[in-house]
Amino acid sequence: MRAQPRASHYINGRFVEDDGGVLLPVIYPATGEQIAALHAATGNIIELAIEAARAAQPAWARLKPGERGRILRKAADILRARNEELSRLETLDTGKAIQETLVADAASAADALEFFGGAVAAFHGDYVDLGGPFAYTRREALGVCVGIGAWNYPIQGAGWKSAPALAMGNAMVFKPSENTPLSALALAEIYTEAGLPDGLFNVVQGYGDIGGSLASHPVVAKVSLTGSVATGKKVLALAGSQMKHATMELGGKSPLIVFDDADVENAVGGAMLGNFYSTGQVCSNGTRVFVQSGIYDRFIDRLTERTKKIRIGDPLDPDTQMGPLINKSQHEKVLTYVDIGRSEGATLHLGGGVPSLQGFEGGFFIEPTIFTGVADDMRIAREEIFGPVMSVLTFEGEDEAVARANDTEFGLSAAVFTRDLPRAHRVIADLQAGSCWINHYNLAPPEIPFGGFKQSGIGRENSLAALQHYSQLKSVYVETGDVVSPY
């Protein structure tokens, strides 16, 4: 189970170690055993990474966008060719079932690199006719960007942040979560192999203090964070105090609304994807499932039947459908919320316990959990749990569903299941969320923006919107006649 990288950091096209940094153990969540040991960045490591990025960025930005894109597309090809080994690494790092990592992690990063590698050549400024004089705008790189990743989708997050940044001509210093430090290093090697000039994608490890040091560095022009609302507020305040660009992709408590006329199997499938995929550790999860009363009994029956069949076990077994939570702390947090749900008066309809799995006694497993009889003011219906805990609520009418769905500080995602498409579009338009689905849940292709409203974030990942967030707009006025001056 060893997964020790050659060194803790990747700077200027090579692995770099500095054992003066704080020890950073890597734990396999399925067994609790240590599979690698890294060191957090020291001040010297941070300066080396920032300087490498600063020195490499100007020449990179001067390249034709198509030339930059060609390197990203080659890196995407390498990611796909090595998907199996990268998926195994991601499973060891996160504990997620390998049947998930094979389709949702390195493959998603490859999709992002491929999209931005092609899209950037057509992303440019505008010409403005001023009746003789004219003007044009230029989209220019920001410079050195910092990416701070989350532990639930490590290589995907590294790809989603680095692809638009690099495509636009920026350099990036990326800090993975201390819980999942391995796969970003693999991505960095792949970038080098694909021909990315040294210094443009650097990986440094560490805890929150390292992220703060990177975000506050005077050379850094932009910070992109995926994480909790609490962390996002701290990083955004830090960036704002120095007038840095920032993208915050934060948490949620998203509503999934099922109307009476919905296809039951599809609605149940969507709710399960929105609560149990990646052991519920997805920021956009639809953890408040509002079911209209007329379909409630059928929905609960099928949800119960299908949830009971979820296979929990060895994440490296292709037949396993749910692995463990990321670490002991998260395991304890989720179990605490199960107790809170009971104490608040919700009905623990299914799950909520710790399964007994031979050979995995030290792992951080939990059963997929369903609460019924949930009220809007319960903590399990208001606070982000980040585990496989679904709250099912009932409603009578459309207006009620919308009002209750919007009654939250979050606004990351939302979904509607119905056969009535006019109603689907009407309800989606009224929901205060940035990433929405009709009759599906949690799909995030790189062609469309991903991000939230309200406390769930600022800015967008993916799509042409991400290129906007990794660029600055310059206006140029061109006079074709004489200067008219009163002086």
Image: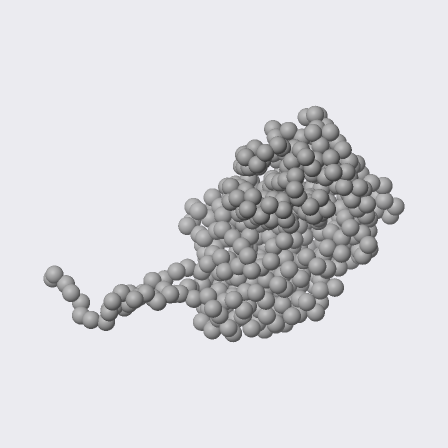
Question: Foreground residue, 158 or 416?
Answer: 416
What residue appears at the point 46 percent right and 48 percent down from the top-left corner?
239
Q: Can residue 390 be seen in this view?
A: yes
Q: In this view, does 199 lie to the left or right of 384?
A: left
- The residue lying furthest to the right in this view is 358
**Vertical relation: 347 (above or below) 169:** above
Residue 379 screen position, x and y as percent:
63, 31
In the rendered image, the quadrant that contains the N terminus is bottom right
Residue 94 screen position, x and y as percent:
71, 51
Residue 300 screen position, x and y as percent:
74, 37
**Vertical relation: 185 (above or below) 394:** below
Quadrant assignment, res 221: bottom left
Quadrant assignment, res 399: top right
In the rendered image, the quadrant that contains the C terminus is bottom left
**Vertical relation: 264 (above or below) 343:** below
Question: Foreground residue, 41 or 82?
Answer: 82
What residue appears at the point 32 percent right and 65 percent down from the top-left corner?
128
Residue 166 screen position, x and y as percent:
52, 64
Question: Foreground residue, 423 or 361?
Answer: 423
Coloured how?
one colour
What residue appears at the point 62 percent right and 63 percent down from the top-left corner?
111
- The residue lying furthest to the left in this view is 487
How many numbered circles does the render carry? 0
Q: In this view, does 165 lie to the left or right of 78?
A: left
What residue appears at the point 59 percent right and 73 percent down from the top-left corner?
195
Q: In this view, does 76 lie to the left or right of 325?
A: left
Question: Foreground residue, 7 or 184?
Answer: 184
Q: Is residue 250 visible?
A: no
